[in-house]
Image: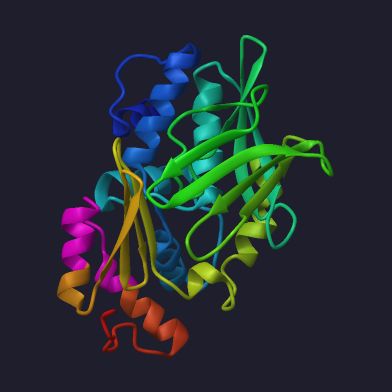
């Protein structure tokens, strides 16, 4: 195994060489817990270079090791695909359609002639590889529900997310397998001023028993059939939430907020009313 991938495994807290289904389960769980879904690394790169581009594997690993960062589906899923291949897994990187074709990435991994759906880049608690020959698969996390089922129109599969606020948000994943470079144009487009992740603050962490979503000034905790929301009304509250509750003490969240304010021309922290 080459040095970058040995480093990758070390950052996931994995010793030895994972293999088989148990190894895949370990890789997925450790990846979700060690590598956040976040757009801060995206904002930092754009601010540093005044342009967007594809992140390299060393940059991705540096973000994890030194800044408690991770990335979006354009880093987390492609680099996990490469790691799995380095370990000898039959792993395909696939495109998935959301508002536009192929704007999301995910994986299909085959073990002993069984195909599994894997996605560590959706900010969702997909802790287990999902068998594609046993659909539908349904998951619950807090008040959220996720359903993976077949999509007759594409002969692929559809992931739907149901929350208290939205119904059926998700993606449709389909063949053919894609090289990482296929998504270069989509990655560049994701740095446009109108892109969602250039106009918000987003961090998701998945732990063994619960998960957290930071969306702008609200922190959502999903656990035991219930979702609770904490409103963050000052920079200190937000920094403490990132450092202590999300477990990212080295994350440059204050710098990311300053970048957002420059990009949007609006203050990020404004007085808000707590719900009654």
Provide the residue span drawn in magenta. 239-256
Q: Main secondary structure of the magenta part?
A: helix
The answer to whether any part of residue 7 appears in the image is yes
Query: Which residue is at a point 50% across and 66% down the rendered structure image?
Result: 165
Is 211 placed left or right of 191 in the picture? left
Q: Residue furthest front?
A: 276
Image quarter for residue 261?
A: bottom left
Quadrant occupied by the N terminus: top left
**Which residue is rendered at x = 53% and y = 45% of the image?**
146
- Residue at 55 percent across and 16 percent down: it is 88
Give whichever of 99, 198 is nearer the camera: 99
Q: Nearer the viewer, residue 268 or 233?
A: 233
- Most extreme residue toward the right, as rendered? 153
Q: Position of residue 221 (x, y in %)?
A: 30, 55
Residue 90 location, x and y as percent?
A: 62, 20
Is 254 inside the magenta-drawn segment? Answer: yes
User: Does the magenta segment cover residue 175?
Assistant: no
Asked whether residue 249 appears in the rendered view, the answer is: no
Residue at horizontal 42%, vertical 73%? 47
Residue 209's image quarter?
top left
The C terminus lies in quadrant: bottom left
Left or right: residue 92 versus residue 156 is: left
**Would residue 237 be found to the left or right of residue 195 on screen?**
left
Expressed as whole percent of the image width and height from the top left, the position of residue 60 reads 41, 47
- Which residue is more in the foreground, 64 or 174? 174
């Amino acid at each position: 195994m080459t040095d970058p991938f040995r480093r990758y495994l070390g950052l996931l807290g994995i010793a030895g060489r994972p293999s088989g289904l148990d190894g895949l389960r370990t890789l997925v769980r450790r990846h979700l817990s060690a590598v956040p879904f976040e757009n801060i690394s995206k904002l930092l790169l754009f601010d540093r270079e005044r342009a967007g581009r594809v992140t390299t594997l060393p940059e991705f690993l540096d973000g994890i090791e030194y800044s408690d960062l991770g990335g979006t589906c354009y880093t987390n899923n492609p680099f996990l695909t490469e790691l799995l291949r380095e370990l000898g897994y039959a792993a395909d990187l696939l495109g998935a359609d959301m508002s536009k074709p192929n704007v999301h990435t995910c994986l299909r991994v085959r073990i002993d002639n069984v195909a599994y759906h894997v996605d560590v880049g959706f900010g969702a608690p997909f802790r287990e590889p999902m068998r594609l020959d046993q659909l539908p698969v349904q998951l619950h996390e807090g008040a959220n529900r996720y359903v993976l089922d077949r999509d007759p129109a594409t002969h692929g599969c559809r992931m739907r997310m149901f929350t208290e606020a939205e119904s059926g948000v998700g993606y449709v994943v389909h063949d053919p397998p894609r090289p990482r470079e296929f998504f270069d144009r989509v990655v560049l487009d994701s740095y446009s001023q109108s892109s969602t992740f250039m106009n918000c603050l987003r961090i998701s962490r998945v732990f063994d028993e619960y998960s957290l979503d930071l969306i702008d000034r609200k922190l959502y905790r999903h656990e035991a059939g219930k979702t609770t929301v904490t409103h963050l009304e000052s920079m200190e509250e937000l920094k403490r939430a990132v450092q202590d509750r999300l477990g990212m003490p080295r994350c440059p969240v204050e710098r990311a907020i300053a970048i957002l304010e420059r990009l949007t021309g609006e203050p990020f922290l404004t007085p808000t009313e707590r719900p009654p």
